Image: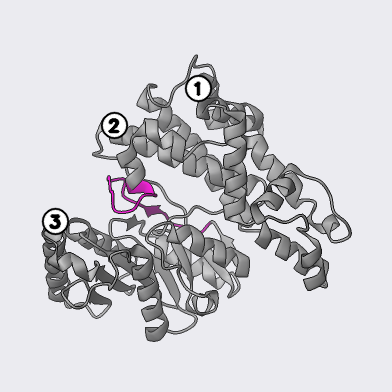
């Protein structure tokens, strides 16, 4: 069973080779496919001259490595770049995974990576062990931890705020046992070649391709959240795509709140209450604010009868219900409820800690949580950065605990 690391790279000369070293340190036999890419029109654009030059230097350095385990593709030089200026990381990921399918065997593992990401030395062994113990139609959303060393205080605050959002969201999705409980990180995804072939491939989007791909995999199979080892994404600023880590750091803490709110945990409970009705819905309709929302989103007053007609067993019907109330619809419902309730992120996380500290928080963090909950007028924008670090560590611990628990389900 080979691990094939697929890495899109654009303007990544300063980062890519450290990433390669990290992969090789994890296992010298790992395979690496790299796509140096940019739209072809950039090669005639003076404003993109630095990017073009960076990509050319990167290609030259890769050639000098002369390593049989590293295969790189030139989708950047004149005549080789993407035909559309709108093509980006989704196209590069799709291109690389298609290449992996042609070059390697069905039982081998595609690992999606970013060019500025490192992995722990035990990561490769952990991924192999995971796939040895799980069936073919499985994908892995790996454990991660953003590196913040060397960041400015402002960028550190932004990065911590963004990771707090990511942790808090997936914790609540794991807590309610949603099939869409995963963290959408393009640098933390792995699946078998055979599953990729059946999945329809990575959506060719310029951003959020990781979320939509994971959602597609969750509908077709199962996305798990835990293996031994850790992914360490970079926390540097980036304006390449409008969503994700780099753009969030660039936004700053104040603006992050509008794009990445911390939802009231009770809104996640609404989702849980709705999905718990799926089995009974096979017999008759039931009311739920989530179902009302879904009816409006889909512009129908007949949500469930078509699913009953097309799925002649309860298990198939329940699966179809989860496909209808998918990860995107869940997020849209949570967003709508957040706007209605107009509660602050700080209030929502304090309420979450007060409600679940006894159930989810390790004894090591009880005093820290007590202190955080007692901070008068807690503000992520102005509080001491150490407070955000403590919140991240608590959420990281909860996240890891729930991920380990979910692997047995």
Query: Left of 337 or right of it: where is 85?
Result: left
Q: Residues within 10 Å of mark 2 (few under 14, many from 20)?
A: some
Of 125 and 42, nearer the camera is: 42
What separation in Å lies between label 3 and label 2 (alpha carbons)?
28 Å
Q: Which residues are magenta?
A: 226-246
* Closest to the observer, 168 or 252: 252
Identity of the residue drawn at 33% across and 60% down: 114
Task: Give the residue pinned by disc 1.
Answer: 372
Q: Nearer the viewer, mark 1 or mark 2?
A: 2
Mark 1 vs mark 3: give the one in front: 3
How many numbered marks does the figure carry?
3
**Magenta part, dominant SS:** loop
| Residue underneath mark 3 | 47
- Relative to 108, say whether 336 is above or below: above
Q: Position of residue 373 (x, y in %)?
A: 54, 21
Contact? badges 1 and 3 (CB < 8 Å): no
Magenta residue check for 243? yes
- Residue that appears at 57% across and 27% down: 343
Distance between the alpha carbons at the discs numbered 1 and 2: 21 Å
Residue 154 is tagged as 2
Residue 145 location in percent, x, y? 40, 47
Q: Position of residue 303 (x, y in %)?
A: 75, 58
| Percent position of residue 58, x then y | 16, 66
The answer to whether residue 144 is left or right of residue 239 is right
Lower sequence index among marks 1 and 2: 2
Give the Cα distance between marks 1 and 3. 47 Å
């Amino acid at each position: 069973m080979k691990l094939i690391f697929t890495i899109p790279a654009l303007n990544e000369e300063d980062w890519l080779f450290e990433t390669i070293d990290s992969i090789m340190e994890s296992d010298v036999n790992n395979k690496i496919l790299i796509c140096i890419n940019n739209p072809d029109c950039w090669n005639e654009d003076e404003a993109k001259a630095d990017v073009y030059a960076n990509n050319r230097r990167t290609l030259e350095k890769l050639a000098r490595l002369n390593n049989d385990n590293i295969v790189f593709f030139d989708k950047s030089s004149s005549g080789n770049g993407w035909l559309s200026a709108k093509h980006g990381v989704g196209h590069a990921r799709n291109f690389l995974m298609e290449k992996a399918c042609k070059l390697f065997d069905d039982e081998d593992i595609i690992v999606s990576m970013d060019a500025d990401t490192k992995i722990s030395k035990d990561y490769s062994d952990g991924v192999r062990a995971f796939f040895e113990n799980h069936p073919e139609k499985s994908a892995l959303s790996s454990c991660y931890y953003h590196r913040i060393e060397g960041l400015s205080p402002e960028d550190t605050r932004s990065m911590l705020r963004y990771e707090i959002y990511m942790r808090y969201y997936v914790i609540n999705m794991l807590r309610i046992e949603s099939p869409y409980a995963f963290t959408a990180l393009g640098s933390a995804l792995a699946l078998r070649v055979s599953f990729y072939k059946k999945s329809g491939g990575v959506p060719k989007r310029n951003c959020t391709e990781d979320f939509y791909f994971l959602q597609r995999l969750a509908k077709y199979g199962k996305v798990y959240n835990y293996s031994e080892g850790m992914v360490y994404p970079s926390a540097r600023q980036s304006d390449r795509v409008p969503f994700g880590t780099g753009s969030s750091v660039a936004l700053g803490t104040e603006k992050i709140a509008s794009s990445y709110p911390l939802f009231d945990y009770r809104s996640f409970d609404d989702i849980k209450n709705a999905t718990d009705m799926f089995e009974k819905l096979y017999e008759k309709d039931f009311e739920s604010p989530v179902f009302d929302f879904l009816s409006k989103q889909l512009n129908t007053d007949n949500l469930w009868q078509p699913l009953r007609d097309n799925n002649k067993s309860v298990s198939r019907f329940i699966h179809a219900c989860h496909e209808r109330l998918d990860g995107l619809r869940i997020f849209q419902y949570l967003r709508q409820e957040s706007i209605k309730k107009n509660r602050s992120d700080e209030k929502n996380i304090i309420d979450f800690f007060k409600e679940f500290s006894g159930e989810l928080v390790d004894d090591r963090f009880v005093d820290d949580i007590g202190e955080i909950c007692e901070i008068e007028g807690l503000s992520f924008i102005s509080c001491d950065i150490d407070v955000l670090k403590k919140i991240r560590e608590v959420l990281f611990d909860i996240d890891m605990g729930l991920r380990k628990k979910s692997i047995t389900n």
